[in-house]
Image: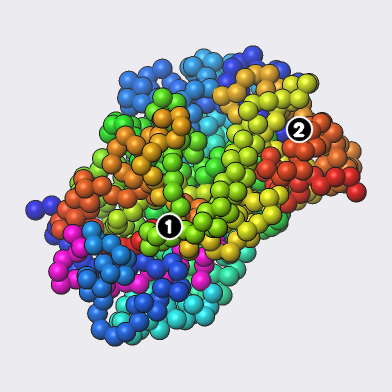
């Protein structure tokens, strides 16, 4: 039996919602069970990752990937109400922040009940929450746990160019200095379930999409902007990303060098961020990591 | 305000100092590195590195002889823990040579270097993606002297961070090389071109659909097609305008010259010219261009006249007015007042 399997804590399930309009679909009472989760996500494949009797324990609300999607107080209150009705723990997902966003965040955080989690993808956010809101718990998001996740890699050796550093003792020291006891990860290309080991910190695993790269300049967010104001840092948008995604088509571009056409990791872009969907091998690795309790939480999301 | 410029060859050092830089940065791949780790990945670039320690020592001496400083990049986004010993060794040897600072992105490595080579200054790389004053404070507490801000911050953000952290030096991009994604949040490999190259210019064929997988209306698709055309034009600027130059050899491409006066006012320590892998002539011309604007700023040019000077050097006002060539498009050239 692996060390990971000896952990006594029960498996937790998170469901991620970034569009506040979708909260209403989850309204109701009683536990959110696997079929309801699959229906909400419109994704029957996730059922393979979920034990039959599982119920969602954590509602992730907000955005890890865009400063324009930080909820306002009214939407956060709606999410908190939903969480109370469904007996869920709320996790506020937050993106990389500038100082203005830190200020907005500092106004939102007092709304969270003690013990709520803040998913931080920015060391400044983690520092703010730990320093000024000690009743809240900080979780290190995927953007703080670096690893190669290029969906085009032709072989496993490419993934070893820069080995993932999240297990480093010094990384753990930094995390612990900020009160962080959990980190969140994707399944990188070629990983097996044994990738998920990190003594000293609990792991959460995201599925069925991994984020590949995040920008600040947003193509679809520039849709309604005058040409001269498009693709600018911090530029305005109309949250176009909530209504449109780009998915990899069947045909590579004219150059015929479309990397992703060579393997089974299909990519998609939503707003600022590129993702890949787990193929059968990575879904199997995720399922095994869950089954073996190498991770103590599984977080499901749509694109 | 200083100019920080890249070198990949020893002969570039006096040329860039003469052109107006006072800080230089370089990389090295020690000869035994590949044998030890089966990868040439000591920093963010496989190419454009000095070949050995002897060259690095000469580089330090040459920079100091020209009254410049030399920084060493150890700036991979992340390293395995098993790399730390070797990286500390490189940093310690660089410090022993008189090297001035290391540029680092990986927080565990920052703490290791602060503990093991405590007298060597640490600059947090743009790859560390530090975008707020709380993150700057954290980095300062970990031992960082300077924070190199990522691309795609606004001038207002720079000003605010500089005000909030007067005890930390701030360096900001001014010329050359643009990423589509945030450098510190892009987990891909710049593959050889036969395998697709950088992912942001790989020839993906993407289709728009709504989040439920349904097709968009024809009208909306038309709008996205126009937006895609604008984006393609922006990418051309972002990747150096086809590596074109003025008749004098000044390179086009991502540029923050018009923002220099405000950076100077904000107390920014240094402006960064990117492009370690670039040609020597490109580096020299880049530094010359930045120097001309900096001299104007130092002589009291206000924001508008500094921008006018920058545009007069560029000689293609259309590029400047597009905003697509700007690191800081909020101060893009809109014509003489």
Look at discs 1 and 2 and give the one toward the viewer: 1
Mark 1 vs mark 2: tell me if same chain.
yes
Residues drawn in magenta = A47-71
Disc 2 is placed on an element classified as helix
For residue A104, above or below residue A208: below
Q: Residues within 10 Å of mark 1 (few under 14, many from 20)?
A: some
Asked if the stretch drawn in magenta spans residue B194, the answer is: no
Tag 1 residue: B215
Tag 2 residue: B290
Which residue sits at x=44%, y=39%? B204
- Expressed as whole percent of the image width and height from the top left, the position of residue A286 reads 22, 53
Distance from disc 1 to disc 2, alpha carbons, whole Å, reads 48 Å
Quarter of the N terminus of chain B within the rendering: top right
What chain does badge 1 belong to? B
In front of the other: B220 or A231: B220
Which residue sits at x=41%, y=24%? B194
Position of B170 compared to A125: left or right? right
Which residue sits at x=80%, y=44%? B333
For residue B178, above or below residue B224: above
Position of B301 compared to B191: left or right? right
Do labels 1 and 2 touch, CB within 8 Å?
A: no
- Expressed as whole percent of the image width and height from the top left, the position of residue B280 reads 65, 18
Disc 1 is placed on an element classified as loop
Mark positioned earlier in the residue sequence (1 or 2): 1
Query: Residue reaching furthest front?
Result: B218
């Amino acid at each position: 039996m692996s060390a990971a399997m000896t952990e006594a804590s029960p498996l937790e399930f998170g469901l991620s919602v970034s569009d506040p309009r979708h909260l209403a679909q989850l309204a109701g009472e009683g536990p959110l069970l696997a079929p309801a989760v699959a229906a909400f996500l419109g994704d029957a494949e996730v059922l393979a990752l979920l034990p039959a009797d599982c119920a969602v324990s954590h509602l992730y609300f907000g955005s890890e990937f865009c400063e324009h999607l930080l909820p306002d107080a009214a939407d956060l209150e709606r999410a908190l109400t939903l969480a109370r009705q469904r007996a869920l723990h709320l996790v506020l997902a937050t993106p990389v922040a500038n100082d203005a966003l830190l200020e907005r965040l500092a106004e939102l955080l007092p709304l969270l009940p003690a013990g709520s989690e803040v998913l931080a993808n920015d060391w400044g956010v983690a520092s703010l929450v730990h320093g000024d809101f000690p009743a809240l718990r900080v979780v290190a998001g995927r953007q703080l746990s670096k690893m190669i996740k290029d969906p085009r890699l032709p072989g496993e050796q490419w993934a070893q160019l820069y080995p993932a550093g999240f297990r480093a003792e010094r990384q753990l020291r930094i995390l612990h200095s900020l009160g962080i006891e959990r980190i969140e990860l994707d399944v990188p290309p070629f990983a097996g379930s044994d990738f998920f080991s990190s003594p000293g910190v609990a792991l959460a695993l995201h599925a069925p999409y991994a984020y590949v790269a995040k920008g600040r300049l947003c193509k679809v967010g520039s849709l309604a902007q005058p040409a001269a104001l498009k693709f600018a840092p911090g530029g305005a948008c109309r949250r176009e990303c909530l209504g449109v995604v780009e998915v990899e088509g069947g045909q590579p571009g004219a150059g015929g060098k479309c990397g992703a056409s060579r393997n089974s990791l299909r990519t998609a872009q939503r707003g600022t961020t590129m993702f890949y969907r787990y193929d059968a091998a990575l879904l199997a690795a995720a399922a095994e990591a869950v089954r073996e309790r190498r991770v103590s939480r599984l977080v499901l999301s749509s694109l | 305000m200083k100019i920080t410029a890249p070198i990949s060859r020893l002969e570039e050092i006096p040329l860039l100092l003469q052109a107006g830089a006072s800080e230089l940065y370089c990389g090295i791949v020690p000869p035994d590195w590949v044998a030890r780790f089966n990868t040439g990945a000591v920093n963010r670039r496989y190419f454009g590195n000095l070949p050995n320690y002897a060259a690095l020592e000469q580089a330090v001496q040459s920079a100091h002889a020209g009254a410049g400083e030399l920084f060493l990049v150890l700036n991979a986004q992340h390293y395995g823990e098993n790399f730390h010993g070797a990286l500390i060794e490189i940093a310690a040897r660089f410090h022993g040579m008189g090297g001035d600072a290391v540029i680092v992105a990986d927080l565990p490595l920052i703490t290791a270097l602060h503990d093991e080579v405590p007298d060597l200054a640490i600059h947090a790389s743009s790859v560390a993606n530090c975008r707020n004053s709380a993150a700057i404070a954290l980095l300062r507490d970990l031992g960082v002297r300077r924070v190199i801000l990522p691309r795609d911050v606004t001038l207002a953000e720079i000003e605010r961070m500089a005000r909030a952290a007067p005890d930390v030096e701030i360096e900001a991009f001014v010329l050359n090389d643009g990423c589509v994604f945030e450098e510190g949040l892009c987990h891909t490999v710049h593959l050889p071109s036969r395998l697709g190259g950088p992912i942001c210019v790989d020839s993906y064929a993407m289709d728009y659909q709504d989040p439920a997988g349904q097709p968009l209306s024809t009208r909306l698709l038309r709008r996205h097609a126009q937006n895609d055309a604008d984006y393609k034009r922006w990418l051309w600027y972002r990747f150096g305008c086809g590596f074109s130059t003025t008749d004098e050899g000044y390179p086009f491409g991502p540029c923050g010259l018009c923002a220099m006066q405000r950076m100077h006012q904000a107390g920014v320590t240094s402006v960064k010219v990117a492009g370690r892998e670039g040609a020597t002539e490109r580096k020299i011309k880049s530094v010359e261009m930045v120097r001309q604007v900096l001299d104007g700023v130092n002589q009291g040019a206000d924001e508008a006249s500094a921008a006018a000077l920058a545009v007069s050097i560029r000689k293609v006002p259309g590029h400047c007015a597009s905003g697509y060539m700007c690191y800081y498009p909020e101060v893009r050239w809109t014509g003489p007042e």
